[in-house]
Amino acid sequence: MNEREITGVIVDAGHGGVDSGAVNGNIYEKNFNLQAAEYIYDRLRELGIPAKMTREEDVNLPKNERIAKVRELYPLDESVLLISNHMNAGGET
């Protein structure tokens, strides 16, 4: 097994800005994604693991800009882990 050391983590808070993701009343997926990303980022830093976030506030990051941001944070580094948070809505059973 070829094991690689992780040199960093990118934490991506999905959606944001005008892209709210799933919505139920006044609950917006983009807000939960950002809260989860902030928690993960803070915990990684507490553990001494280098981490960066794609967004730290409620801003719109279209797909091409999100990809560019990831590449900007850690250019073409295969030893970086990307965590992208999405909390999709499900239907009733």
Image: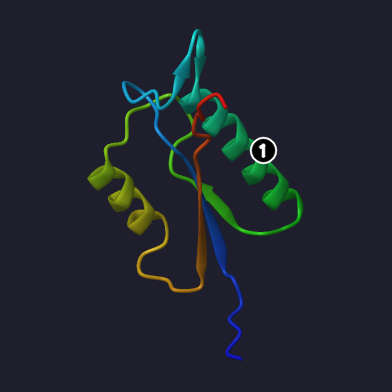
Counting other residues with Cα less than 10 Å from the Cα at mark 1, is it few (<14), some (14-19), or many (20 or more)? few
Residue in the picture at 38% in, 53% down:
70
46 is higher (above) or lower (below) than 56: below
Q: Residue furthest right?
A: 47
Name the outermost residue toward the top. 25
Q: Is residue 48 left or right of residue 36?
A: right
Residue at horizontal 61 percent and vertical 84 percent from the top: 3
Q: Which residue is mark 1?
A: 39
Give the residue displayed 52% in from the left and 24% down from the top: 31
Instruction: Give coordinates of residue 84: x percent, y percent.
Output: 49, 47
Q: Position of residue 10 (x, y in %)?
A: 50, 53
Q: Name the one closer to the observer, 48 or 86.
A: 86
Q: Residue furthest bottom?
A: 1
* Residue at the extreme front: 93
Q: Quadrant of residue 4?
A: bottom right
Q: Is residue 81 above or below residue 37?
A: below
- Percent across and percent down for residue 30 are 46, 27
Number of marks in picture: 1
Q: What type is the residue that disc 1 sits on?
A: Tyr
Q: Which quadrant of the rendered structure holds the N terminus?
A: bottom right
Left or right of residue 88: residue 93: right
Up the image or down, 79 lies above or below 47; here it is below
**Regarding mark 1 in the picture, which secondary structure is present there?**
helix
Q: Position of residue 41 (x, y in %)?
A: 62, 45
Query: Measured along the vertical axis of the image, is residue 21 above or below residue 72?
Result: above
**Residue 87 horizontal side relative to residue 69, left or right:** right
